Image (spheres, coloured by chain):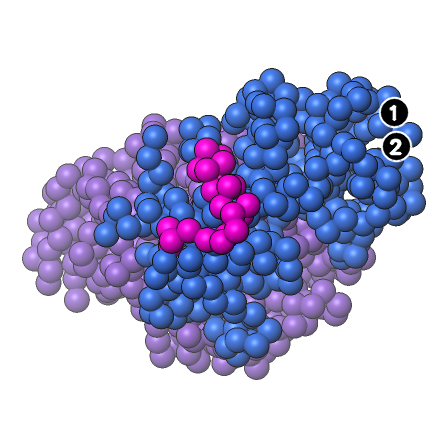
Chain colours: A blue, B purple
Amino acid sequence: MIWTKKDLLGLEYLTAEEIGLILETAESFKEVSTREIKKVPALRGKTAVNLFYEPSTRTRVSFEVAAKRLSADVINISTETSSVRKGETLIDTGKNIQALKADIIIMRHNCSGAANMLAGALDISVVNAGDGWHEHPTQALLDIFTLKEKLGKIKGLNVAIVGDIAHSRVARSNIWGLTKLGANVTVCAPEMLLPVEIEKTGAKTSSNIDEVLKNTDAINVLRMQFERDEGTAFPEQLDYYKKFGITEERLARAKKDIIIMHPGPINRGIEISSEVADGKNSVILEQVTNGIAVRMAVLFLVSQAREARI
Amino acid sequence: MSILIKGGRVVDPVNKIDAVLDILIENNKIARVANDIKTQADSIIDAAGKIVGPGIVDMHVHLRQPGREDKETVSTATAAAAKGGVTTVLAMPNTSPPMDCAENIKLLKGIISKDAKINVLVCGSITKGRLGKELSPAAILKKNGACALSDDGCSVDDSELMLDAFKKARQAGILTICHCEDKKISGKGVINLGFNSTRLGLRGISNESEYKRVARDIELAQKAGAAVHIAHVSCRQSVEIIAKAKKKGMKLTCETAPHYFSLTEDALLGYDTSMKMNPPLRSPEDLAAIKQGLRDGTIDAIASDHAPHTDNEKDIEFERAEFGVVGLETELAVSITELIDAKLIDWSSLFKKLSCNPSRILGIDKGSLGQGMPADIVVISAGKEWPVRKNELISKSKNSAFLGRTLKGTVDYTICNGKLVYQK
């Protein structure tokens, strides 16, 4: 299996084998972060640009750490201070970065499809760090990596994703990745937060978290973005916690060794209780650690593919 | 100046002609349609093996002038129209300024008389500024040459105002064309609501936002006793509602656009902004209903909804890009490819949808090859394939949904008012 794509845009576009290759590569990179000198020369002399159109700390920093551990040079462009403010188009910004002879653009954007568009316009690599409601492939990859590490496999696992599925790129990427690898995925949310025809991805839907929890090996708890301006389509915060919040009481009826994941940042007492977030089933901080290995793997693979083309 | 079109297959549904005949044009009018005309003409067009029909009457075109001459002008749009076999267009009123008063219509008419290469009819707006608040003066607009009224791009949300609009239009004897969309339902949607909007992470536009408004406008028009024409029908339920109303004997007509019977929402999977239009490309089920509606006569007309936008407005993030596609240069070929070639309808039926019916709906003396009619004629090589290439489009904007596709049917000659306005 050889990786051939210059970009990583979403898990919908990958085969199970390609996802498997990223996970394998990540496994071998994970050890680097445990060394005394946490660096390998895999991307020495390469330049990665973090182009973030949306505020993000954890994803941006995770990519930056990953790139640096591969010995790449990293430049952070904040759209608050760049010429984007002066009305430059996304494609022009991308072409300018390409003209600087950068090798990889890591982009976060609030518009779905922005990474697809940029990747189509450039020869250099584009890694999607989250676009609108569309995909957040490296988040799903690190979720899947963590699950596999904990449970030894993905095939046949029952995985639930709970929260605002309709507006979640994390949910979409997880659904594609997990179903491709043979997991049984159930998305759980109030009906108004389930996107239309989501079942066509292969995921099941439910609005009853207690029912779902009965037979679930792992649950991915999404952040509820109550600040989102979507008018009336949002439940009351307290009501949501009562019906969908992941609490110890609720978990008492679940499998004893259920895995609790969360992409962060956590809203304690809104979608998850502090006890659960910090409890023995939670792998939330391990996800953060694994995120580095997964992102190292992605940056490494897209670079190789790009160079193989030249 | 006389032109003799020799030996083509003349298709003229109005006069129930479909036969190999000659057409003689004299003094800008059709002088004779007969077998083997032996007359000395100033020029002769050899139409052997070609289809000869009435020029296309496209009742839904955005010329963008006045106001957005960077997108399109009367001059560039009518040249593109001539290339597409179109001899008459109805110019939608969402210009800047909009066609909501006599002065603005006069302004546009001045430009048309100077720059237009084919017939251009003007559509006035239903409400002032197309804001849906206050009615434009229907009778005055008509007196100044408006031949229909529409707030195209918007629907009049206020049902009482819309009822009043239909009443005033009836009194003025003018047709109302309805853009049917309930924006309370479609909201900030950018593509069809369904699995594709879910997987792409884009806001959806439901069929409901269209067909509920179709039902309302038909009901209001009926109440007012006014003529109504539904623009750009895109979904199954709209076709069903219109079919039902027609069966009941209500006086209404409708159109669809070539992209609704040739493309589905799957064209959006790569976030291609040249596939972004409103109403959006729908599901295969909707497309089948549109085709069936064309076949059984529920859908009267095909119109391009030619909506030019610059590259700057399209080569950006999908949800920020403008809605709309150009269509004047491809509507005939898409119709031939999808309807004639696929044996869905015959030539006579196609010319009805593209020319005769729009003429009848607008109440204009076009769409026929009868003796004494203005000579608006298109000569087509029906079997000839051609690739749609961006640099070969002559419209000022190149936002075609068919770039890269190979279509069947080339326009070889377009004659408008007896003059050759396009030759391949």
- Looking at the image, residue B347 lies above or below residue A88: above
Marks 2 and 1, how far apart at CA: 6 Å
Which amino acid type corresponds to the residue marked 2 in the rendered image? Glu
- Image quarter of residue A175: top right
In x, y percent, where is residue A120?
Answer: 38, 53
> What is the x, y in percent for residue B99?
57, 72
Give the side of residue B379 with respect to residue B155, left or right.
left
Whether residue B44 can be seen here: yes
The span picked out in magenta is A22-43
Tell me the residue at 72%/65% (across/down).
Answer: B132
Residue kind at label 1, given as amino acid type: Ala
Magenta segment: does it hold A235?
Answer: no
- Let me know if marks 2 and 1 both belong to one chain: yes
- Which label was assigned to residue A252? 1
Taking the image as drawn, is residue A111 in sight? no
Q: Specify whether residue A24 is painted magenta.
A: yes
Q: What residue is drawn where x is 54% and y is 56%?
A: A65
Q: Is residue A86 left or right of residue A235?
A: left
Residue at the spot of label 2: A248
Pointer 1 indicates a residue of which chain? Answer: A
Circle 1: element type: loop
Tell me if label 2 and label 1 are in contact, CB under 8 Å: yes
Is A40 on the left or on the right of A160, as rendered?
left
Residue ID at (45%, 45%): A298
Q: Chain of mark 2?
A: A
